[in-house]
């Protein structure tokens, strides 16, 4: 089981995306699919119909005459809501077969966890031979990030957190070294973490030295996001350990910070290159928008009269043109300033944690807003020029004008979401 991470919801190689993960968390699963929580008569609460629940509530109401009607109404309402909830998901599964596939995967995951729980209950933990057999499985599950497997073993035998492999690595050293956030999060619920955080391996590396090592990941796109993720790991572990361990040296006479700097030297260069290329490309586009919008402000549609006042000044479409032109100009200026800040950054290690991602997020949002405002300004100009002759032409022009805005959103939205969630979201440990 420990060598099959796909059998668990959070194992290495999980193929669920953001939307699929949301469906996975929300979709209900009947208890009948998990063996150990079946009732003795082989029926579950989900098999009971509304009439059965009402009859049960009536029996309770006879025992408690004061609150009987209230309990009966509550039970009936709860049963109806449950049935409607199940009917809704059953309908969705018929309309979208992919939801049914996700439900089957959730059932398999729950069954796998239940099998591990049953096995753990049948193990004689005081037997050293059993402990030795399960130790390799325990560390293999941590290496693959199967936190449910690890959690069940810890729940069955508290002493498993003190197990060490041949290199004197504990379960949490392995979790940090392989960047398994789900396993590492078990630290926060542990009341004895101070006992093993200071454990050193055969090379005198403590857990912070492991956090300082570079661990490439296919789950993170881009060198800058990879560097941000590595910094989050190092900071999280650094906040847990005793200040003495932050300056402790290993057999190579290196502190954890020195290990981090040495291991991530090339990644910093790659992140710097990616950031500069992205900022340069986007700043060129933003500069072009500034040029166009600045020129449009002095060459208004319809021209000016002899006193220099716009001929369409009192038209509502002209007000839309003027406001959208100004918004596009100002937002593109903000975008250029943000990208300029990226290009002139020092590119220290700490900059990748918050400073650089924040500038890129603001720059991308401002540029998207400037492009959208520019298309609104263009549509208002077309309407002002052609509304007296071809009123119908405004509709296709407006529809076509939405195409570049939509394309930009579709192309840049995944990067923006990843950058925003890693910077301002809950983080890889579910805490910010």
Image (cartoon, helix red, strand yellow):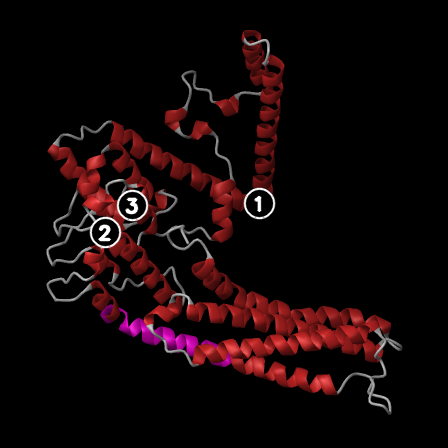
Question: In the image, residue 241 lies at what x, y percent?
Answer: 24, 53
Magenta stretch containing residue 374, yes or no? no
Q: Nearer the viewer, mark 2 or mark 3?
A: 3
User: How many numbered discs sit on the rendered protein?
Assistant: 3
Q: Which residue is mark 1?
A: 96
Q: Main secondary structure of the magenta part?
A: helix
Who's the residue at 43% across and 36% down the image? 107
Quick one: label 2 or label 1, which is nearer the N terminus? 1
Q: Which mark is residue 187?
A: 3
Question: In the image, residue 427 lies at what x, y percent?
Answer: 41, 55
Q: Which residue is mark 2?
A: 174
Who's the residue at 29% across and 50% down the image? 144
From the viewer's perspective, tell me whether residue 19 is left or right of residue 172. Answer: right
Magenta stretch containing residue 267, yes or no? yes
Residue 255: name its quadrant. bottom left
Question: In the image, residue 73 lies at what x, y percent?
Answer: 63, 20
What secondary structure is marked by label 3?
helix
């Amino acid at each position: 089981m420990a060598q099959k991470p796909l059998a668990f919801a959070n194992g290495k190689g999980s193929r669920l995306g953001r939307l699929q993960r949301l469906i996975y968390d929300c979709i209900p699963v009947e208890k009948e699919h998990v063996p150990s929580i079946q009732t003795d008569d082989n029926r579950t609460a989900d098999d009971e119909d509304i009439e059965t629940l009402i009859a049960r509530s009536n029996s309770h109401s006879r025992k408690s005459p004061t609150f009987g009607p209230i309990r009966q109404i509550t039970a009936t309402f709860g049963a109806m809501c449950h049935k409607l909830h199940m009917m809704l998901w059953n309908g969705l599964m018929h309309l979208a077969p992919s939801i049914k596939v996700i439900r089957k995967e959730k059932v398999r995951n729950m069954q796998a966890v239940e099998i591990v729980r049953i096995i753990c209950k049948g193990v004689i933990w005081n037997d050293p031979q059993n402990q030795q057999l399960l130790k390799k499985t325990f560390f293999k599950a941590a290496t693959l990030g199967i936190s449910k497997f690890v959690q069940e073993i810890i729940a069955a035998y508290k002493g498993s957190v003190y197990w060490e492999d041949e290199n004197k690595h504990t379960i949490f050293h392995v979790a940090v070294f392989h960047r398994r956030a789900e396993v590492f999060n078990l630290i926060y619920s542990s009341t004895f973490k101070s006992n093993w955080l200071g454990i050193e391996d055969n090379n005198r590396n403590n857990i912070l030295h492991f956090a300082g090592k570079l661990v490439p990941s296919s789950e993170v796109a881009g060198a800058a996001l990879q560097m941000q993720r590595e910094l989050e790991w190092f900071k999280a572990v650094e906040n847990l350990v005793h200040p003495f361990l932050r300056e402790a040296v290993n057999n190579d006479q290196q502190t954890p910070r020195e290990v981090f700097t040495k291991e991530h030297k090339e990644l910093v260069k790659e992140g710097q290159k990616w950031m500069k290329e992205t900022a340069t490309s986007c700043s060129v586009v933003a500069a072009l928008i500034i040029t166009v919008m600045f020129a449009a402000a002095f060459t208004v549609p319809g021209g000016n009269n002899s006193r220099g006042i716009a001929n369409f000044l009192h038209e509502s479409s002209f007000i839309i043109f003027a406001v959208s032109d100004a918004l596009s100009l100002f937002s593109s200026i903000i975008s250029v300033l943000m990208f300029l800040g990226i290009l002139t950054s020092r590119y220290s290690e700490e900059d990748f944690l918050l400073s650089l991602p924040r500038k890129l997020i603001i720059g991308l949002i401002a540029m998207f807003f400037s492009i959208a405002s520019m298309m609104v300004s263009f549509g208002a100009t077309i309407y002002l020029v052609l509304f007296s002759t071809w009123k119908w032409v405004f509709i296709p022009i407006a529809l076509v004008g939405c195409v570049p805005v939509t394309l930009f959103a579709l192309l840049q939205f995944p990067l923006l979401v990843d950058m925003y969630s890693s910077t301002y979201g809950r983080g890889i440990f579910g805490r910010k």
